[in-house]
Amino acid sequence: MGADARRSTGGAAAGDRPPVTAAPACCIAGGGPAGMMLGLLLARAGVRVRVLEKHSDFLRDFRGDTIHPSTLQVLDDIGLIDAFLALPHRKVRRVRLPASRGSVDVDLARLGGRYPYIAFVPQWDFLDLVAAEGCRLPNFHLSMGSEVRDLLVEEGRVVGVRTRDDGGDEEVRALLTIGADGRDSVVRQRSGIEVAETSPPMDVFWFRVSRRPDDPDGLVARVGGGHMAVLIDRGAYWQIAYIIPKGAGDEVRRQGIESLRDTVGQLVPEFGDRVQEIGGWDDVSLLTVRSNHVRRWWRPGLLLIGDAAHAMSPIGGVGINLAVQDAVAAHNILARPLLRGRVDDGLLARVERRRRLPAALTQRVQAMLQSTVVAPALGARPAEVPWPVRTLLRTPYVDRLLPRFVGQGFRPERVRPAP
């Protein structure tokens, strides 16, 4: 993890808060994008919220950091856009998809509006920003280093969680419990809600090399010889996602770090001697790619959102943005009932109905790209942009739909005013 990662202050901000003196109306397990954003939005509406994050800070590998226009608009809605744009970030206005005949560009300028770009910012900075804003509110309490271990259930209804921190075990009771604790959600496991797994054909090695002033900018994919890499412009360096066949991590390691350097050098010749910056396997991290969705998002007293409800493939960098959209929809539907002290099952089902289709459609698009671009590329076959995508890009007026999908998703949410 780079030195810039150590600037995270979320734990310190949380530590400055006074002890909890009243039971929350909403207990949120997980301080990622979904949990933190929902906690902030509900607290702004006057709902007492407690967010439980098992780690002591937000410094996590493999956290998505592609902030799409849909999330930028949410930050605008709640008055945080200027603070966000003051963070060190890179703007990407064009996404290049590999194809057997060159590449296909998705021009986000076609979106129009105030935010026709994707902003790359470390997720720990994003979460620090949201956490600091939440900690200014009297109804918001963030407990860092507090790990949810089990659910509290009475007469078939979830009434809170059992947590553990350095001080021991604690029961946190609430009118509503939110499971936003990621793809390995303990809340989901303890709830008994079933999850359907899919099988993405890839895993990803992550590493970085330095960036020079004459390098291209933006987001670039390279394909050749049965190999594929995505180059992410971080300003001072390139973050490289080197894509490998599913389960091939051990075999790649057995071939040695020099083999990896040679492959990357052939795939991206302009990096030249920079591949020597990959000093050893300590500089390379493996992300095991998963994609899944729950068969039901709720049970009485409990709602799952974000990766706990639908773990996404990294294709498109959509995970953080879908998580934020889930949080906004949950706020819009549940804030007023929480203030009134009653959240019935029908409202939880309503959140699911609103967000299930966008998540499912996004996963289908990801699966299409995995089967028509990623799998052929890894098999040394021509990678081709699917014909529906090519048609969108070549049809006047209709060609604006693909940039809209990339930037906004299938159902972007807007924050409704607090009740």
Image (spheres, helix red, strand yellow):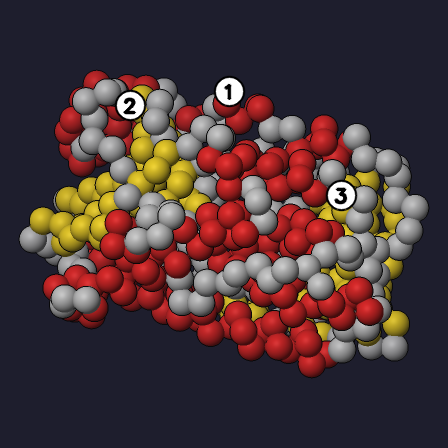
Residue closest to the eye, 91 or 249: 91
How far separated are the C-alphas under marks 1 and 2? Answer: 16 Å
Disc on the earlier residue, 1 or 3: 1
Q: Residue 203: x and y, percent?
A: 38, 49
Residue type at tag 3: Leu
Residue closest to the eye, 259 or 395: 395
> Image point 38% across, 48% down: which residue?
114
Disc on the earlier residue, 3 or 2: 3
Which quarter of the picture shows residue 200? bottom left
Residue of label 1: 3
Residue of label 3: 137
Residue type at tag 1: Ala
Residue reaching furthest to the left: 101
Label 1 SS: helix
Q: As drawn, is 321 to the left or to the right of 180?
A: left
Task: For the residues labelled 1 and 2, say whether their Cβ atoms are less than 8 Å apart.
Answer: no
Task: For the residues labelled 1 and 3, say whether their Cβ atoms are less than 8 Å apart.
Answer: no
Which quarter of the picture shows residue 362? bottom left
Residue of label 2: 211
Residue closest to the eye, 300 or 9: 9
Q: Nearer the viewer, mark 3 or mark 2?
A: 3
Label 3 SS: loop
Q: Nearer the viewer, mark 1 or mark 3?
A: 3
Q: Residue 255: x and y, percent?
A: 30, 34
Residue reaching furthest to the bottom: 346
> Image point 81% across, 44% down: which residue?
138
Q: Residue 28: x and y, percent?
A: 72, 55
- Circle 1 Cα neighbour tier, 10 Å, few/some/many (<14 / 14–19 / ≥20): few
